[in-house]
Amino acid sequence: MPMNPYLKQYKKTQIETTPKEQILLMLYDGAVRFLHQAKAGFAEKNIEKIHNNLVRVQNIITEFETSLDMETGGDFAKNLFALYEFMNRQLVKANMKKDEAALDVVIKHMTELRDTWREAVKKFKAEGNSLTETDMDKYNSSNEKVYQDDDDDDEDDDEDNIGEYI
């Protein structure tokens, strides 16, 4: 069922006006949620559920990788990229070989990353900060939007999580 065009526009506007650090957290939360949905797919022996959710996480990881500025980020960006690549390989293994242990490794790392970023954002905001578009350009080598959902047939849209961080 296609998404309501008004809801789609609302979500697009929300993404464009949400502080960048909040979008990052939303992506991490989405990745963790999709990982747990894939884990549930293993329990249900639902191959399609496993596959679809792992592909969603891979798409988020790809977005994280492409937004890293390797020059400005130095060793931190290189290490983060290597971790993303490792998780991506584990997701391929989990998907192709239906290896639940590989999925568990990614759940552990992605959850730790998400929790770390959440604490960093809390501290950052507690100090009265927010990243502006110009600030983000220092950390993001591409001037593209962080995430854009063009999947009109997405049945697992996050209507219930809209505004969670605002």
Image (spheres, rainbow, N blue to C red):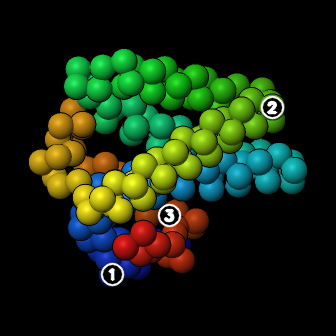
**Residue 67 or 52: which is nearer the viewer?**
67
For the residue pair 129 and 29, the one nearer the viewer reads as: 129
The residue at which mark 2 appears reads as 101
Where does residue 142 sit, x and y in percent of width and height? Answer: 21, 36
Query: Which residue does the image show at 54% across and 77% down from the upper left?
Result: 160
Above or below: residue 97 compared with residue 151: above
> Residue 37, position in %: x, y?
70, 54
In the displayed structure image, the side of residue 106 where residue 62 appears, left or right: left
Disc 2 from disc 1: Cα separation:
41 Å
Tag in front: 2 or 1 = 2
Whole-number angstrom distance, CA of label 2 to CA of label 3: 30 Å
Q: CA distance from mark 1 to mark 3?
A: 15 Å
Task: Please name the residue that numbered disc 3 is placed on.
Answer: 153
Judge the density around disc 1: few (<14), some (14-19), many (≥20) Cα neighbours within 10 Å: few
On the picture, is 134 further left or further right than 93? left
Residue 157 at what x, y percent from top left?
A: 52, 67
In this figure, which residue is indicated by the disc labeled 1? 6
Q: Residue at x 24, y 37 (%)?
A: 140
What kind of element bears circle 2?
helix
